[in-house]
Image (cartoon, grey):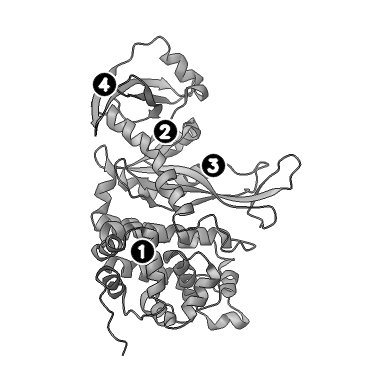
Amino acid sequence: MEVLDTLIRCLRRCCAALPDRRTGANARYTMADIGLSAFSVFFLQSPSFLAHQRQLAEGHGRSNCQTLFGIEQIPTDSHIRALLDPVPPEHFFGLFGDIVAHLESTGGLAAFQRLGEHVLIALDGTQYHRSAKVHCPHCSTRTRPGQPAEYFHTLLCATLVAPGHSKVVPLEPEFVVPQDGHDKQDCESRAARRWLAQHGPAYARLKPIYLGDDLYARQPLCEAVQATGGHFLFVCKPASHPTIQDYLTGVEMPEHVARVKRGRERLTHRYRWLCDVPLRGDEQALAVNWLSVEIVNAAGKVTYQNSFITDLPVDATTVAELAACGRARWKIENESFNVLKTKGYHLAHNFGHGKEHLSAVLATLNLIAFAIHTLCDLAAGAWRQAVATIGARMHFFQRMRTITAYLIFPSWAHLLETLAFARAPPLPP
C-alpha cells in the first residue's frame, strides 16, 4: 500500500499548509488534523459527518486515525466546518496532480491512452447542492413561477475516461459561481474555458483529447482547447450547427462499414466523415473535421447514431476509434457523476455549506477521495484483493468503517490484509 501511504502523506502536507484561522477553542487542533478529518469522511464513505466524527472519537477509533490518516487529535465537526470555510478549494488542487503522477509512475495511465498516446479528458457540469433556504454568496440562483428562489451550486468536472475501461479519474474541478464583472450568472462554457486556461498547460504532456457534449462544440471552446496544446472531440448536433449541415447537404461522403458481433447480437457500424468544414458561418470560422456513427441491428433498426467534430485527422483508419472515443464522453455521467451521487460518496448531500468556501472544499475532498480509490483499484494489489473478497464496493467501505471501530491497525497494509484474508492485525504495544 505504498501508493496510498504516499498520497496520505501528500494530503497531510497540503493540510498542514492550510491558512491558519484558529482562535480560542479551535487552537488546540492543527490545520493538518482539520483537513485530514474532513477527508477521512469521504475516504471511508461515511454518510453522516457528525456520526463519522463521533465514531472516530470512540473506542479505538482515535488510534486508527493516527496510524491510518496521521490525525493527532480529532476535532469536532463544528470546528472542521468553521476552519475550512475560509479556505479556497484551489488549495487542494495540487493533490490531483500527485494522483496523476502516481498513475503514470505505476503504469496505470497506459490503460487510458487511445489513438496512439492520447488521453481522453471529458468535461461536463453537475449540480451538487440545491436548497430554498441554505445559501452563500457563491450560490447561483434561479426562480420558477409561483415558487421561492432556489439556490444551488454547480461544478465543472474534468475526468480521465477511456472506451472499454470501467474506471475514471477525476481531475481538478472548476466551480460555477456568479463572477465579478458579469451581469449574468456564470455558465458551464465559461467555467470550461477557465479550467482550460488554469490546468490545460499542465496536462498538455499527456496529449489530451477533450470530450464534451454539444454545448462545447463552439468556436471559443475549441480555440481554448487548442491554445493549451490539446485536441477536441465534441458532440455536434445537427440542429445547433446549421452551417455544418449546409455543407453536408448533397455531398457524397466517404463511408466505412464494420460488422460487429457482440455475443449473439450482430450489428453494423456505419461511419461517415467530411474534413475541413467551417464550424460557423463567418470568415473567421474554424475549420473542423466532422464524423458520424450509426449502429444498425440485424433487423435493420438504428439503435444509436451521433455526430462529432474534431481537429484530429479523420479517415478510414481512424474514424471508428474516434467515434468510440467520442462516445466515451458518457462515462463522466455514468461512471463519475452517478457513482459520486448514488454509490456511497453522497456528493449531493449537504455535509456543510458555510458562508464562504466550505461547500466547494468538501466537494473537492470528495473528488480527491474518489480519485485515490480509483488509483488504488488500478495500482494496489492488496486493495484489489480486499475488494474482490468482500464483493460490492459499498460493502467494502461499510466493512472498513465497522472493523476500524473495534480493532487497531498499525497500517493500511494490515487493514487490507484483514479484510482480504481475515487475518487479525498485530496487537498494539
| Relative to 299, 174 lies left or right | right
The amino acid at mark 2 is: Phe
Q: Are marks 2 and 4 in contact (CB under 8 Å)?
A: no
Q: Do the residues labelled 4 and 1 touch (CB within 8 Å)?
A: no
Considering only order in the chain, which callout, 4 or 2, is on the residue closer to the N terminus?
A: 2
CA gap between label 4 and label 1 equals 44 Å
Q: Pointer 4: what residue? A: 257
Considering only order in the chain, which callout, 1 or 3, is on the residue closer to the N terminus?
A: 3
CA gap between label 2 and label 1 equals 37 Å
Considering only order in the chain, which callout, 1 or 2, is on the residue closer to the N terminus?
A: 2
CA gap between label 2 and label 4 equals 22 Å
Residue 203 visible (yes or no): yes
| Relative to 376, 133 lies left or right | right
Q: What's the mark number on residue 188? A: 3
Q: Pointer 1: what residue? A: 396
Q: Pointer 2: what residue? A: 234
Farthest residue, direction bottom: 429
- Position of residue 236 relative to residue 53, above or below, is above
Mark 3 or 4: in front is 4
Q: Residue at x 46, y 35 (%)?
A: 213
Mark 4 or 1: in front is 1
The amino acid at mark 4 is: Val
Q: Residue at x 55, y 68 (%)?
A: 84
Mark 2 or 1: in front is 1
Q: Residues within 10 Å of mark 2 (few under 14, many from 20)?
A: many
CA gap between label 3 and label 2 equals 15 Å
CA gap between label 3 and label 1 equals 35 Å
Q: Which residue is drawn at 76% across and 41% down?
A: 146
